[in-house]
């Protein structure tokens, strides 16, 4: 198989995305046809590393990322004219005024580093500097699988760039040239991080559950995927859940003609496996959910071989 890049995404969090990725990674890693790299691009809440810990803490490489810019006020240059506050230089309301000291005060969490204040200030009493926005962590897992994940710094807003950094770093791995599958745990939602995740991929797995929010957010996620023209398949988790949304989900899938990769029925083995920080296919290989995930993997592999 030629190299394929796929991501598991979900419109909403908590539908079993990371749990599915961990199981697919475990199956693919044991498959002799597959040479795998795993990425966790859910940079605001990266959890995959809990299930796939490093072989040795000493081999963990952490790289700081400086994708955010913030303003620095240069007090010694300021002539205290107050224009920055009175003329509302900052569209993000990050500039306030200290009446006691007669200086601008900066709200660093609100500052987007746009540089408008630096340009508009008659004395250029502001400086724009890159600040640490997160980290990219890479290592070989205890089962000798390369894993790279990003971690956004609290309050940082440019996680899309961090996601791109994670994807780029994979290309620098020694193993990259021999890799024929890159499996990504994508972020939930439809924002910047998920857009950065799906761009350039070969296939998307969208996981959902038969609940009102599951269906609603699945539709939004697929609308976003369609913008990129990437083929996708759906996995329904807790597929046997007794809920009012079952009919609506089935009707939607029938009408839309979307590809169903598989259905995973509710199975206590999954939360149990998670509580032991293991994938369900490793924790309970004979469970109904493990059997369903193995079938999903086989179907997915077949689809990828045709792309
Ligand atoms: S506009 Fe510039 S010089 Fe004037 S108060 Fe603001 S920072 Fe100081
Ligand atoms: S850099 Fe932009 S966002 Fe930050 S304080 Fe200046 S004008 Fe506001």
Image (cartoon, helix red, strand yellow):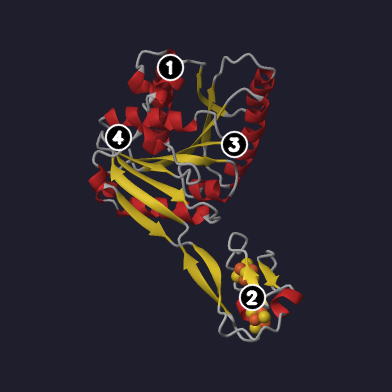
Give whichever of 175, 272 is nearer the camera: 272
- Tags 2 and 1 touching, CB below 8 Å: no
Is residue 101 toward the left or the right of residue 237 in the image? right
Tell me the number on the disc at residue 117.
2
Rounded to the nearest angstrom, the CA distance separating label 4 from label 3 is 28 Å
Q: CA distance from mark 1 to mark 3?
A: 24 Å
The answer to whether mark 4 and mark 3 are in CB contact below 8 A is no
Left or right, residue 95 beside residue 24? right
Q: Which mark is residue 34?
A: 4
Pick whichever, 62 or 284, lies toward us.
62
Which residue is the site of mark 3?
11
- The percent coordinates of residue 187 (x first, y second) are 51, 42
Q: Earlier in the sequence, mark 4 or mark 1?
A: 4
Whether residue 52 sits left or right of residue 117 in the image: it is: left
Mark 2 or 1, closer to the camera: 2
- Residue 238 appears anywhere in the view: yes
Instruction: Please say whether residue 121 is visible from this viewpoint.
Output: no
**Where in the figure is residue 15, as x and y percent of width and height?**
54, 29
Q: Is residue 121 above or below residue 97?
A: below
- Closest to the camera, between mark 2 and mark 4, is 2
Q: Are marks 3 and 2 in contact (CB under 8 Å)?
A: no
The 10 Å Cα crowd at callout 3, few under 14, some 14 to 19, many 20 or more, is many
Task: Give the distance between the C-alpha atoms of the residues marked 2 and 4, in whole angstroms.
Answer: 52 Å
- Percent across and percent down for residue 258 are 58, 29
For the point 60% across and 78% down, the residue is 118
Instruction: Identify the image quadrant of the N terminus.
Output: top left
Element type where label 4 sits in the image: loop
Q: Marks 3 and 2, Cα distance to the nearest angstrom?
A: 37 Å
- Disc 1 or 3, which lies upstream in sequence? 3
Foreground mark, 4 or 3? 3
């Amino acid at each position: 198989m030629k190299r394929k890049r796929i991501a598991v995404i979900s419109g909403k969090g908590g539908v079993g995305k990371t749990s599915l990725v961990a199981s697919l990674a475990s199956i693919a890693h044991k498959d002799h046809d597959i040479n795998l790299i795993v990425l966790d691009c859910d940079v605001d809440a990266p959890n995959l590393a809990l299930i796939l810990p490093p072989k040795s803490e000493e081999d963990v490489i952490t790289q700081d990322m400086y994708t955010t810019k913030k303003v620095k006020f240069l007090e010694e240059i300021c002539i205290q004219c107050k224009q920055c506050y009175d003329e509302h230089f900052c569209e993000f309301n990050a500039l306030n005024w200290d009446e006691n000291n007669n200086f601008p005060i900066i709200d660093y969490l609100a500052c987007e580093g746009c540089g408008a204040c630096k340009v508009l200030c008659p004395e250029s009493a502001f400086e724009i500097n890159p600040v640490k926005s997160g980290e990219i962590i890479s290592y070989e897992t205890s089962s000798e699988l390369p894993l790279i994940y990003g971690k956004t710094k609290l309050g940082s807003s440019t996680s899309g760039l961090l996601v791109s950094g994670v994807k780029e770093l994979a290309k620098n791995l020694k193993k990259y040239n021999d890799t024929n599958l890159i499996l990504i745990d994508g972020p939930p939602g439809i924002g910047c991080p998920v857009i950065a995740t799906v761009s350039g991929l070969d296939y998307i797995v969208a996981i959902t559950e038969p609940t009102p929010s599951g269906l609603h957010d699945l539709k939004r996620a697929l609308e976003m995927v369609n913008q990129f023209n990437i083929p996708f398949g759906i996995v329904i988790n807790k597929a046997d859940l007794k809920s009012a949304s079952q009919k609506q989900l089935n009707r939607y899938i029938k009408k839309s003609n979307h590809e169903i990769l598989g259905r995973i029925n509710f199975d206590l083995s999954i939360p149990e496996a998670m509580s032991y920080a293991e994938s369900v296919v490793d924790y309970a290989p004979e469970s109904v959910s493990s059997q369903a995930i193995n079938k999903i993997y086989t179907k997915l592999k077949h689809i990828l071989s045709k792309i």
